Every structure is written in C-alpha cells, then in structure tokens.
Image: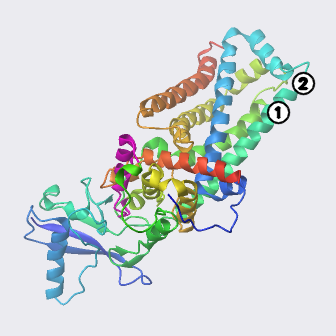
Amino acid sequence: MKLTLRVWRQKNADEPGAMSTYQVDDISQDMSFLEMLDTLNEELTLKGEDPVAFDHDCREGICGACSLVINGDAHGPERTTTCQLHMRSFSDGDTIDIEPWRASAFPVIKDLVVDRTAFDRVIQSGGYISAPTGTAPEAHATPVPKPDADYAFENAECIGCGACVAACPNGSAMLFTAAKVSHLNVLPQGAPERESRVLDMVATMDAEGFGGCTLAGECATACPKGIPLFSITNMNKEWLRATRKSGKR
Amino acid sequence: MLMALATRTDRRPSTIRTLWDSSVGKKTVMAVTGLIMLGYLVAHMAGNLKIFFGPGDFNGYAHWLRTMGEPVLHYEWALWIVRFVLLAAVILHAVSAAQLSRRDIKARPVKYVHKRPRASYATRTMRWGGIILALFIVWHILDLTTGTVHAGDFQHGQAYQNVVGTFSTWYGNTIYIVAMVALGLHIQHGFWSAAQTLGAGSRNRDRLLKTVANVLALVLTLGFIAVPVAVMTGLVS
C-alpha cells in the first residue's frame, strides 16, 4: 500500500505545531497502525529527520498508552486501540490525518504525545479503596452478587487511554471518571468511600479543566473497551445521592 | 473488619454550594428547570388548542387563567406565581447553560484539523436552539402578553383576536414556526439528557425514554404549529 500521511508535528509544549505531509510506500495490510508509523520513523531517521513521537507500550490493547486521533476518530475507524488497528482498515492511496488527543487538560508534550497525568490526579482523589494490609482476606467473607460483579468488571475494563476525552465535543472526562466510580461504588469493598469518592473525583475532574457532559454519546462510541454511556448516568445518580447524604452531616 | 480511614478535618460545603460549583450539579439545575418548563409547555400547548372551539371558549379560558385559584388566591395571583417560577427556571437554565458552555469551549482550545460532525443534529444544535428559544420567548411575551410589538390592534382580554392578528403576518408565522421546530429539537435531546443527568436512565429503560422524548418533541411542535397553520388556512379567523 502507498499512503499519504498528514501528521501533527510539534517540537515541544511551547512552540506551535502544524500538520506535515509524508509519503509511505510498501505498507503491508497486516501491519498494525503503530508498525506503519514505525516504518515512517525508520525512514525519517535514515534521512536524518526527527522521528514522529507517539505513545505506545504493550501493543496488545490492554495498557492504555497508545492514543492518536485518526481521520477524526479516536483510535481510528475500528472500535479498538490504535495498536490493535491494522492497515487492512485502510485502502491503497488513502490520505490519513493523524492528530494528538485534543483537550486543555491533555496538553501536547511533543508531536502526538500528550500529558495525561490529569487522569492520575482524578484517580488519586478517590479511585481507590481503603483495605487493611496483610494476608488476603477469606474470599467468602465478602459476598458480591453476580450482577454486581459483572457490572463492576464491565467498568473496570477502562484502561484510561483518554479516547473518551478526545472524542467528546467538550473534552469531557465524564466516561473515564464514571467508569472508575461505577466500578468501585457497586462493590462492598468500595462502600466506605462511596460518597467521598464520587464527590472528590468529580470535583478533581472539574478542577483539571475537563469540559462538562452534553450526552452527545461520542465517548462511548470511541471507547475501545466499550464502557457504556449509562455509566455516566450511574455516576450522576451516585453524585446526587452523595450530595444529599453529605449535606446532612 | 476494621477500616482505617483518614479522618477528614475539612467540612464539605453546603449542598447548594456543591451543586452550583460542580459541572454535574449545574447539569442537575438544567435538568430540573428544563423539566419544569417542559411541564408548563404541555399545559400551554393543550390550552392553545382551545382556539379550535372558537373565540368564546378561547377567551373564556384566557380569563380563567387569571381567576384560577380563587377564592383562596386573589385575581391573577396564581398566574403571577406561575410566571415567577418560570422566570426563575429560565434564568437558572440559561445561566447554567452559559457557564457550562464556556467551560466546554475552554476544554477544547485547539480544534481537530480533520473535521467530522459529532453527535446528532438535535445534540449539536442545543446551544443555538436555546438562544433562538430565549429570543423567541422575549418576542412572544412582547407580542401576545404585553402587545408591545403586536402587528395589529392589540386588546387585553381578546386573546383569540390577538392570536389571529399575529398569525396574519408572514413574519409572525415564520418566527413562530422556526422557534417551534427549534423547541422540538431542544426537547428531543433535552428530555432524554435530563433523565440521564438525574440518574433515571438505564439500558433497560432507554428505549422508553427515547420514545417519550420523541413523542413529547413531536406532539409539542405539531400542537403549537397547529395554531398558525389553522389561521393561515382560514380554519381559525
């Protein structure tokens, strides 16, 4: 395959960036999207140019490191992570636009790499449980109903990649935060911080400069892990419950 | 099991403060005020349809709006209570919307080069639709409540004749119909969104909520537009 790539190039956080055009030949349909970028970077390195910086780690769709907005879609045209996207999803002669996640809470560090530590701070503010250390507790001591376990797991699938923020017209982190809140709030292990978790995580999410939710649904469509839009509904419900309860104390 | 939790020494702000300071809280304000206005619109639309029973019925109904609640309430008190509630709802809804929109726009300072439409038409037009509706409300009150910008010979208490007057002009019909289409789109996304914001949505209930949103949007738009269409076609004159 021969492809034309239009890639966002930006030296660092302070300098303005722009789209640069590159031609790549000899791209196999079996390559992953990141392997295609590796090929481009090899060529750039051989020519003595600066290779395109992009995030990647496990390359098996479970770590949440890879990103990229490809032709306007977070993680590209398939509902998976960019590392699991293959070039067979494109045709010979295509022009592909590659941009970084766009959100004020995710500033560009270089080229296609953005700073996603805002997510870490949202997690730090409540995305944990308080458990005594020591040997693992007896598993039957805390029964979890099967539907609750399934619900928690569905939300625990979130890998924190940030595609929801990138896809949202408002740069909102509601789906990410909702996945974490829904995952922990449904479980007995998460019960002690049920109210403080949702109040603090939503407050941190707001403070980090993410936008609000207009229920456009773009986040759930882009999510490579299929976190449902109704997790947001659930977080709203948890937030209102916590607001009512904490107001009485 | 002993849970060693850190003792919080800071006090949480009041419920009202928490609501107003949070993006989720402001959405709650928008959802509740939106539903109040929606409830009013259903009653307003149903009342409008009395115009098809002739001037006697319609003007009698308009008069009843002023005497309802009597003798517990004084003349026009119930009407003024409704007006105050609606005014508060409109202001809270609009201020929340403006503040949330500002936050949303600030959250995406650099736009994507590769553009594509995001979300449905109704979702994308919520902000402009809201502005259209706000302007319409001002015109509508000046036209048919105070009579300030009324086209013909405005007379208090002659609601039927005033309505016919407004819809005998091309611009009266145009403004009204455009606003009612905007209203339908606004309600279609707004009602469903309000349900999600208040935590009432779920996977099992989604089809029901979307159907109710579509039916409300369609019935209100068609119900309101029925009046100018009736005047234009001479059914009401």
Q: Say if mark 2 contacts mark 1, CB within 8 Å.
A: yes
Q: Which residues are magenta?
A: A143-163
The image position of residue B34, as x and y in percent, is 63, 39
Left or right: residue B178 compared with residue A244: left
User: Which residue is identified by label 1?
Assistant: B81
Identify the mark at residue B73; answer none if there is no mark: 2
Residue at figure coordinates x 70%, y 43% from the top left = B90
The relative height of residue B197 versus residue A5 in the rendered view (above or below) is above
Asked if residue B168 can be seen in this view, the reply is no
Residue B112, magenta (yes or no) = no
The image position of residue A163, as x and y in percent, is 36, 60
Chain of the residue displaying label 2? B
Left or right: residue A201 compared with residue B170: left
Identify which amino acid the numbered label 2 is placed on: Leu
Chain of the residue displaying label 1? B
The relative height of residue B119 versus residue A169 in the rendered view (above or below) is above
Tell which of A91 and A224 is nearer to you. Answer: A224
Count of marks placed on residues: 2
Applied colour scheme: rainbow
Label 2: few (<14), some (14–19) or many (≥20) C-alpha neighbours in 10 Å: few
The image position of residue B222, as x and y in percent, is 55, 24
